Every structure is written in structure tokens, then in C-alpha cells.
Image: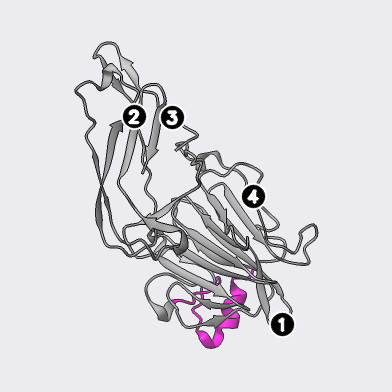
């Protein structure tokens, strides 16, 4: 860990050093059963200090629990498999649409997509913009937008630093993006010549609290296609379902960005890692980006009176 530290402060009355450490949980979207972990502490070797004499910090027990998550996959020109409806349905309209919006009051979250001509008979998704809290991330491949090159680009259009969201890019071809939001929501954007394939992973918080082209997420396939007008559609009326989630021209986040809201700012500061984020799982595979996933090992927090806090795994 780098980019932050904790100060161990001496209480002159009790003669004790103390500090506080917050560990924030996230989701890995991997079915690897429930597990019990130990978060251990040990002093850094080579930095002896009287505070460590005859004292060992007790480990903290952490229990991880598997929970169901939602998965929505728009691909091609574009075909959909939604949160509940896993039969392919197609979106053949051009414009800006709500793909997935959380109705959870704990956080404002929304994903919008733009479709446009992509050389074939049907349109394709050529841009995606996603917002959680004050963080907004856009990946753009639309060829005819002024000032935007045809190669895939990622931007943070609000201009302020991200507050917990991370974005990584495939190092080989540079055409796959991984967007990870603090809530655990993940979006994989795989770009082609003129289209995008998306893999949206929704956290369990949004179960029975989601809407958009990905459908309702309530565990019932028959009620999945609830439109933006409140009507319930079927596969035979999917065109009207699509239109119900289309946004009027000039009203999407591609045109109008949400205003910064101070109360949505995180109440804590994230540390940064020099080596970038590392995904791991007890199963060792099955995560969103399986090629970069390794098995988790014991996590130790190493304390140094002179160097602050270092995490090693």
C-alpha cells in the first residue's frame, strides 16, 4: 500500500499507542462459498521500538458471505440478456437509453448507452456513460461525434478526481476497459471496430431495485421487461419496451452531467496501490477478469513506528 499512512499516537496518561484502521469490504462476484479470514498484524523487522516489547496485536476475524448478483450483457447489434430474462432480446433503435438505473436510495447510480449506425443493417452501442455518486466515467467509440476520435477513449467528464471508482485498461490490445465502482458494481467494456459489448455486474443491494433496458431484477423472468412508462412488455413487444427507456435528445448524461453533491463524497480516504488493484478469490478463478485473478493469501498489516502503515499479502 502507498499513498497513505496511519500515525500511532502515544497517550501520556495510559502510556499506550493507538490508532484506527477502517477496512472497507467489496464484492468479487465469484461463487466461492462462505469463508472465514484472519487479518493479522505484525511489526516490520528492522524497526525495533519499545512499544512492541512483549505485545502482539490480536488478529481480526473477517467473514465473507456469498450473495446473488445481477448480470446484464448487451452485445453485438445489440442483443441483450438481462438481469432476469436470459433469452436474447434486441434493441434496434438509435439514440440514448437508460441501460440500468438503481432505485436504491443509498446511492445514485445509473448507466446510459448510446446506439448509432455501425456499418450494418442494425445499430450498435458505441458509447457508455456511468455514474455512481459524484463519479462519472465515459467510454466512447461513436465515430461521428465532434471532437472524438474513432479509437476507444475513456474520460471523466465532470473534471474532478474519482472518489473511489477505478478504471483499468487491458494492456494487450487496449480495447477492454474495467470500471469498478465503490458499491461493487462492475462494468466491462469490450470495444470492437464500431461497437461495444458490455458486461454489467450489479451488487445484491439492487435486487428488486433496478430498472432500464437490462430489465427488472426481481427474480421473475415473466416480469422482467417493465418499461419506463410502467407498462409490462413481452418479447413480442420489445420494440415498445426499448422506446420507453429512450431519453429525449439533449437530456442524457452525454449532454447534461450531474452536479457535484458534497453529501455524496466519501467519508474516508482511499489509499492507492503502486502495483494497481489486485483481484483475488479463494477459488482462484471465475471473477470478472479471470486472467488477472489469483488465489487470496493471508493478509498481514505491518506496523512501523517510523514508516506508518504498510500492507503486505
Q: Circle 2 — which element?
A: loop
Badge 3 density bin: few <14, some 14–19, many ≥20, Cα 10 Å: few
Disc 1 vs disc 3: which is toward the camera?
3
Sequence-wise first label, 2 or 1? 2
Name the residue tied to disc 4: 156
Q: Circle 1 — which element?
A: loop
Residue 182 on image: x %, y %: 46, 49
Q: Which residue is at the far right?
A: 146
Q: What stretch is highlighted in magenta?
A: 224-246
Measuring 47% from the left and 38% from the top, which residue is drawn there? Answer: 271
Sequence-wise first label, 4 or 2? 2
Tell me the distance, in whole angstroms, between the alpha carbons under discs 3 and 4: 27 Å
Sequence-wise first label, 1 or 3? 3
Q: Is residue 279 magenta?
A: no
Q: Circle 3 — which element?
A: loop
Measuring 43% from the left and 29% from the top, which residue is drawn there? Answer: 5
Name the residue tied to disc 1: 120
Sequence-wise first label, 2 or 3? 3
Sequence-wise first label, 1 or 4? 1
Tell me the distance, in whole angstroms, between the alpha carbons under discs 2 and 1: 61 Å
Question: Of 186 and 168, which appears nearest the observer?
Answer: 168
Give me the disc on residue 44: 2
Amino acid at each position: 500500500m502507498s499513498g497513505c499512512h496511519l500515525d500511532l499516537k502515544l497517550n501520556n496518561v495510559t502510556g499506550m499507542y493507538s490508532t484506527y484502521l477502517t477496512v472497507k469490504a467489496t464484492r468479487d462476484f465469484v461463487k466461492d462459498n462462505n469463508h472465514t479470514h484472519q487479518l493479522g498484524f505484525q511489526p516490520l523487522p528492522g524497526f525495533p521500538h519499545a512499544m512492541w516489547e512483549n505485545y502482539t496485536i490480536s488478529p481480526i476475524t473477517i467473514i465473507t458471505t456469498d450473495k446473488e448478483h445481477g448480470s446484464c450483457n448487451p452485445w453485438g447489434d445489440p442483443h441483450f440478456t438481462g438481469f432476469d430474462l436470459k433469452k436474447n432480446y434486441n434493441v434496434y433503435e438509435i439514440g440514448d437509453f437508460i441501460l440500468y438505473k438503481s432505485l436504491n436510495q443509498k446511492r445514485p447510480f445509473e448507466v446510459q448507452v448510446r446506439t448509432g449506425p455501425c456499418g450494418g443493417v442494425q445499430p450498435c452501442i458505441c458509447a457508455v456513460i456511468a455514474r455512481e455518486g459524484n463519479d462519472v466515467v465515459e467510454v466512447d467509440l461513436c465515430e461521428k461525434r465532434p471532437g472524438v476520435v474513432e479509437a476507444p477513449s475513456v474520460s471523466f467528464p465532470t473534471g474532478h478526481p474519482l472518489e473511489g471508482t477505478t478504471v483499468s485498461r487491458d494492456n494487450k490490445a487496449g480495447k477492454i476497459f474495467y470500471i469498478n465502482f465503490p458499491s461493487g458494481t462492475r462494468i466491462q467494456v469490450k470495444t470492437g471496430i464500431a461497437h461495444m459489448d458490455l458486461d454489467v455486474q450489479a451488487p445484491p443491494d439492487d435486487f428488486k431495485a433496478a430498472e432500464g433496458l437490462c430489465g427488472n431484477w426481481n427474480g421473475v423472468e415473466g416480469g422482467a421487461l417493465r418499461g419506463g412508462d410502467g407498462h409490462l412488455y413481452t418479447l413480442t413487444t420489445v420494440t415498445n419496451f426499448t422506446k420507453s427507456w429512450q431519453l429525449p435528445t439533449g437530456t442524457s448524461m452525454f449532454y447534461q452531467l450531474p452536479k457535484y453533491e458534497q453529501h455524496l463524497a466519501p467519508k474516508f480516504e482511499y489509499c492507492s496501490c503502486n502495483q494497481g488493484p489486485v483481484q483475488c478469490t479463494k477459488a482462484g478463478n471465475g471473477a470478472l477478469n479471470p486472467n488477472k485473478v489469483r488465489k487470496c493469501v493471508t493478509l498481514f498489516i505491518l506496523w512501523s513506528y517510523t514508516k506508518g502503515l504498510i500492507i503486505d499479502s
